[in-house]
Image (cartoon, rainbow, N blue to C red):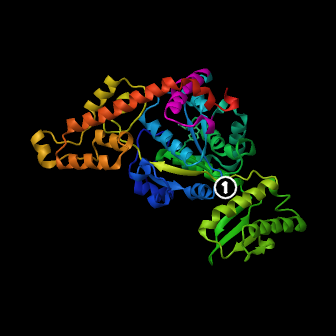
């Protein structure tokens, strides 16, 4: 078993096994329009239901991207990876929602809400501005100031139990309950943008590192359990819609014969509206079959059933989509972590310190120049090369040239480090200029309830 959890200090890099064990789907580059550097280089390697987002995009329909941050430290290159992805989705047409997880930071890290606000604005939002997110289409809010998020977290709690938390997160009897509450509130973060007041029903994608998948699984499970109508594969081909009776809807979908019949008539109507003619409704067994429907039809069918659920008084929540990125190696060769400053570069790092970190960083070169010329270096474990690949060299051809030169022994470790230092210095300098120039925009990123 690969043990993945958001609080572990270990990180597994056995990505193939992770895909298999957690049932992720691999990313196929050809499916992604305008692939980013992360896609092209296989850094974003897996997803859950990204097809919903791509379908919405190709039909010109609304879709959103969501992320959250614990305002508990300084932003570093690991955070940049997520923001770059958010920015990419924004460029593809997504609206952006960002949660400041101040309740989580307050409960699990002991920061006051006032400190959280200060850190969020001065450290995180200032960098988002500099990294070029569009303030017109970015909404940043605080968990503590958006009661609906807390309320959703609370009510979603009834769809799970401690055994599930044990299975997903490995919680034990002595687990602090803040670690139970935080993922529930986080599910509120991820799902609430679909509410009418926050943009309405639309697919929302959450780009994360693989260590965050437990949160995504929990959230998708919770959303799925609220759904009145489910879309499943049908044994003899096509899709089968089933109806879930629960407390909230038992007077409607589990009501008297006439009411149930009306529900099924509405389902059939909704499906006819999508253009299906071969619809087999069986109200008695709570089933509607669509023998001709394909996998691609899942998304439009699901959306129209969620709309129907909403019209009948349900929440109509679509399970979030997600994408997964690989982690850049930490500068000392292990995990990158803000609690170990020598493992990463902060977005406001002094150039001298950055240079020092690269000079000391783990190298894939040989121990003598002669050996290096003869055997070449190993770019796969070389921090300087990996940081060009993950962060600093935008040009694929230029990166490939460096890789070849290093493998051939033409480029020495010191030379490679210097290339990366120069690129990193240019990037850090520009970022700090943009932070200063655009500081006045910070407020424009805040949702009305965050001001
Ligand atoms: N728990 C996340 C962290 O530790 C922060 C977070 C809160 C979040 N809400 C979110 C991340 C919603 C993604 C989506 O950093």
Whether the magenta-drawn stretch holds residue 283 is answered as: no
Which residues make up the magenta segment?
114-139
Q: Quadrant of ligand 1?
A: top right
Residue occupied by mark 1: 224
Whether the magenta-drawn stretch holds residue 116 is answered as: yes
Going by the image, does 162 lie left or right of 286? left
Percent position of residue 367, x then y: 15, 39
Visible in this render: residue 339?
A: no
In which quadrant will I find the N terminus? Answer: bottom left
- For the residue pair 316 and 427, the one nearer the viewer reads as 427
Percent position of residue 93, x then y: 59, 48
Residue at the extreme left of the image, as rendered: 370
Whether 231 is drawn above or below 277: the answer is above
Whether 85 is drawn above or below 321: the answer is above
Q: Residue at coordinates 45% horizontally, 25% vertically from top-left?
A: 433
Percent position of residue 334, x then y: 34, 39
Visible in this render: residue 378?
A: yes
Percent position of residue 108, x then y: 56, 30
């Amino acid at each position: 078993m690969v043990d993945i959890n958001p609080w572990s200090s270990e990180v597994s890099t056995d990505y193939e096994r992770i895909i298999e064990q957690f049932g992720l789907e691999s990313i196929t580059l050809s499916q992604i329009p305008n692939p980013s550097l992360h896609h092209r280089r296989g850094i974003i390697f897996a997803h859950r239901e990204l097809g919903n987002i791509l379908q919405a995009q190709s039909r010109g329909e609304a879709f959103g991207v969501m992320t959250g941050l614990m305002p508990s430290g300084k932003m570093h290159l690991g955070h940049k990876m997520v923001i770059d992805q958010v920015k990419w989705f924004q460029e593809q047409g997504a609206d952006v929602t960002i949660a400041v997880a101040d309740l989580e930071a307050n409960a699990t890290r002991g920061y006051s809400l006032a400190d959280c606000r200060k850190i969020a604005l001065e450290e995180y939002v200032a960098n988002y501005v500099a990294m070029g997110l569009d303030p017109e289409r970015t909404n940043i809010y605080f968990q503590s100031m958006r009661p609906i998020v807390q309320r959703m977290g609370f009510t979603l709690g009834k769809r799970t139990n401690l055994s599930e938390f044990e299975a997903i997160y490995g919680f034990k009897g002595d687990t602090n309950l803040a670690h139970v509450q935080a993922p529930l509130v986080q599910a509120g973060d991820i799902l609430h943008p679909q509410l009418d007041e926050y943009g309405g029903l639309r697919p929302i994608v959450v780009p994360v590192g693989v260590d965050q998948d437990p949160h995504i699984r929990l959230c998708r499970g919770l959303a799925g359990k609220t759904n009145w109508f489910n879309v499943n594969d049908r044994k003899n081909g096509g899709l089968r819609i089933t109806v879930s009776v629960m407390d909230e809807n038992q007077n409607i979908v589990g009501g008297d014969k006439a009411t149930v019949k009306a529900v099924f008539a509405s389902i059939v109507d909704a499906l006819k509206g999508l253009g299906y003619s071969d619809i087999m409704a069986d109200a008695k067994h709570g089933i509607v079959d669509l023998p001709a429907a394909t996998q691609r039809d899942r998304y439009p069918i699901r959306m129209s059933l969620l709309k129907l659920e909403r019209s009948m008084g349900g929440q109509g929540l679509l399970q979030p989509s997600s994408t997964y990125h690989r982690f850049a190696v930490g500068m000392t060769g292990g995990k990158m972590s803000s609690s170990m400053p020598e493992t990463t570069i902060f977005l406001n790092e002094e150039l001298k310190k950055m240079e020092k970190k690269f000079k000391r960083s783990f190298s894939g070169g040989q121990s003598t120049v002669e050996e290096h010329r003869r055997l070449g270096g190993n770019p796969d474990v070389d921090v300087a090369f990996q940081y060009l690949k993950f962060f600093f060299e935008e040009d694929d051809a230029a990166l490939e040239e460096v890789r070849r030169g290093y493998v051939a022994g033409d480029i020495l470790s010191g030379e490679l480090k210097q290339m990366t230092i120069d690129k990193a210095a240019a990037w850090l300098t520009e970022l700090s200029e943009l932070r200063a120039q655009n500081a006045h925009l910070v407020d424009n990123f805040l949702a009305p309830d965050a001001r």
